[in-house]
Image (cartoon, rainbow, N blue to C red):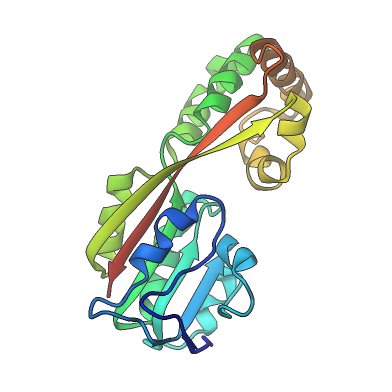
Amino acid sequence: MGRSLHRGPQLRLRGAAGAGLALGAVVEAPSGPVGEVDVVVLGELAQDVLPDQLLGDAAFARLAQVPDRQQDAVVGDASMLPADEIEEVFAEMVRVAKPEGRVVLKLTTHGSFGEFFSIYWEALHEAGIDNDVWTALERLINERRTISDGELMAERVGLRNVESFVSKEEFDYETAGEFLESPLIRDCFLSDWLEIVPEESRDEVRRQIVSIIERERHNAPFDVSIKAAVIAGVK
């Protein structure tokens, strides 16, 4: 399923924004040069890796088709996965790695989108439903794993020599409308965020979100940050 390639002293992947801080460093054979390597790349990273660098599964859904213990390195980007699905996927990544193989997973961690959730709470309050949905909102805010959670998860699925690398990725939006309609927000997160709101109140909550963002940004871009982590280990 992977592709053999010679990468010199270490395997470097050109990945999604922010991923480069760690992937070149952690996907490296403990004994030295990587040499010929079979690699499976999963999730968002697969869309950005140059085709002549490697081939692999472009979606986690196809991971079950990869044979056991065949890959020298398995790299996945779970930034967009629901938090309750990540450990199962991580375990599958370990399954397909050879003994001594590197397994690398990128996560969106606790504290991401904090700027939005502050505004979201205010919008719910202005719409008069904050008390009704507070428990669900708190669950949304806390659903992303901490770095420590990610490291413990790596150990549970069978990795050793676990390391983590952290970066803060910032996204700027010129208007509230641009934020709500951006592919990152609209396609990956917004529907889940708004699901806690009764359907009859969603239009009002969206109006409040737009109003608060436009009021608070003072003609400057609206910034949203993601706290990204790369968790890596050896099988």
- Left or right: 51, with 64 as reference point: right
Name the spot of residue 8 as percent of width and height, x first: 41, 81
Name the spot of residue 222 as percent of width and height, x first: 64, 24
- Left or right: 191, with 134 as reference point: right
Residue 110 showing in the rendered view: yes
Q: Residue at x 54, y 25 (%)?
A: 115
Name the spot of residue 168 as percent of width and height, x first: 46, 39
- Residue nearer the viewer, 142 or 110: 110
From what the image shows, is residue 227 above or below residue 128? below
Q: Residue at x 46, y 28 (%)?
A: 138
Residue 144 showing in the rendered view: no
Q: Residue at x 47, y 32 (%)?
A: 141
- Left or right: 194, with 152 as reference point: right
From what the image shows, is residue 159 above or below residue 3? above
Residue that extends furthest to the front in the rendered view of this protein: 8
Q: Quadrant of residue 215?
A: top right
From what the image shows, is residue 154 above or below residue 29? above
The image quadrant where one finds the C terminus is bottom left
Q: Quadrant of residue 38?
A: bottom left
Q: Quadrant of residue 119?
A: top right
Name the spot of residue 97 as percent of width and height, x first: 37, 80
- Residue nearer the viewer, 29 or 158: 29
